[in-house]
Image (cartoon, rainbow, N blue to C red):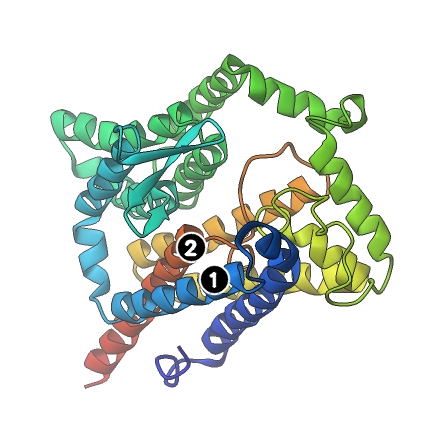
Amino acid sequence: MFTVLKNFKEDEKIFFSIAAIILCLGLIMVYSSSYIFAVESFGQSYYFFLRQIINGLIGGGLFLLISKTKFDFWIKYANYVHIFACILVLSTFLPGVGVSIKGSSRWLNLVFVQFQPGELLKYTTVLMASRFVLKFSEMPINQLFKEVISLFFPIFLLALQPDFGTFIICFSIIIFIGFISDFPRKIFYSFFLAGTLLGTFILTLADYRVQRMLTFLDPWKNPRSSGFQIIQSYLAFSNGGLFGLGIGNSNEKLLYLPEAHNDFIFSVFGEEFGFIGVLVIVSLFVSLIFYGFKIAISFKKEAAQMIISGVVFLIGLQAMFNMGVVLGLLPTKGLNLPFFSYGGSSLICNFFGLGLIVSGLKNKYEELKTSVI
């Protein structure tokens, strides 16, 4: 990664260095939080740790590949990339291809591995939303209608899977891109109101989502069922105190806290490193978002500003949601902590997002060289 970044400015190097630090800390915590569960389930303490390293290597390879592409390609062909992601999401509903886990059809069976297309859809939504707002004023009505369908159809498929967490992320990305662009304000606010009402309606259609909301408000009402996970998360942070119990000494990972190496890995980290450790991780993510937006506003092209901002916003929003959930500030949504939690689909697609940023930076510096010459 750092070989690719050797000619970049200080702010840009800091951004990618912070991402690398979060990734390394995440790898340590994946092992620390999963080795008991891995031994019990697979007879090998390194099971999830080794898989996460492999996911990181695949993601790193994708990062290098995307970083070498022309940035204009992603702007020009955003609709085709998005359609590809749509096909993958649709495939999750096909028998024998889609894999249902805990009642949700979010994964594809790729023989040796399982892939969650919703993770890729988050990034293609950034590309497609940016393309849509840039070309909105130029498109005839018939093309505009097709673009709207292409942008929103896969998002509503997420509600059918169901994957309401990714649904919220993708919807928020569209709102964010529209907000930072020159998109007509009347249309933007009308869409925002209609989308919020529709999203609220979809939320209340499923009993389990309403139950999650009620559990978030009072987890002790059902401490042995729906409230169990969040109560265990509270206990983890409580046990951690100011300085934590020390790495590897978490009690909650001893099969008390479900998803300890995935969505709730931040709870285990809080137990082992305490409030000081939590403060460090939060500071790293805040710094990552700060420097990411500094990179975005350094571009002169509006398209590059929107896409880079969208990628940074996506990572920051998901981190905020995950931390909010494990701290009991938000209802559970099934979203992991970017670069930190266990999960191949998420990690690989996050590397895809970083690759887009590097591609944009290379394009910017090539244009600067050309203008100087």
Q: Are marks 2 and 1 in contact (CB under 8 Å)?
A: yes
Q: Image point 35% across, 80% down: which residue? A: 4
Please report the residue visible at 50 percent of the width from the left and 13 percent of the height from the top: 205
Q: Closer to the camera, 15 or 178?
A: 15
Return the x and y of residue 111 as percentages of the image width and height: 28, 48
* Residue at 48% from the left image edge and 33% from the top image edge: 168
Residue 182 visible in rendering:
no
- Compared across the picture, whether 138 is left or right of 16 comes to left
Residue 290: x and y, percent?
56, 62
Q: Quadrant of the C terminus?
A: bottom left
Residue 216, visible in the rendered structure:
yes
Where 167 sits versus 368, above or below? above
- Coordinates of residue 74 in the picture (x, y in percent): 22, 55
Residue drawn at (22%, 37%) of the image? 87
Residue 245 pos. (x, y %): 83, 63
Specify the quadrant of the image occupied by residue 353. Answer: bottom left
- Compared to residue 150, the image places residue 297 above or below, namely below
The residue identified by callout 1 is: 52
In the image, 22: left or right of 116?
A: right
> Up-down: is 190 above or below 284?
above
The amino acid on which the numbered mark 1 sits, given as a three-letter code, is Gln
Q: Which residue is label 2 attached to?
A: 344
Depth check, front residue: 198 or 323: 323
Quadrant where the image shows the N terminus: bottom left
Between the C-alphas of marks 2 and 1, the distance is 7 Å
> What element does badge 1 sit on?
helix
What SS does tag 2 mark? Answer: helix
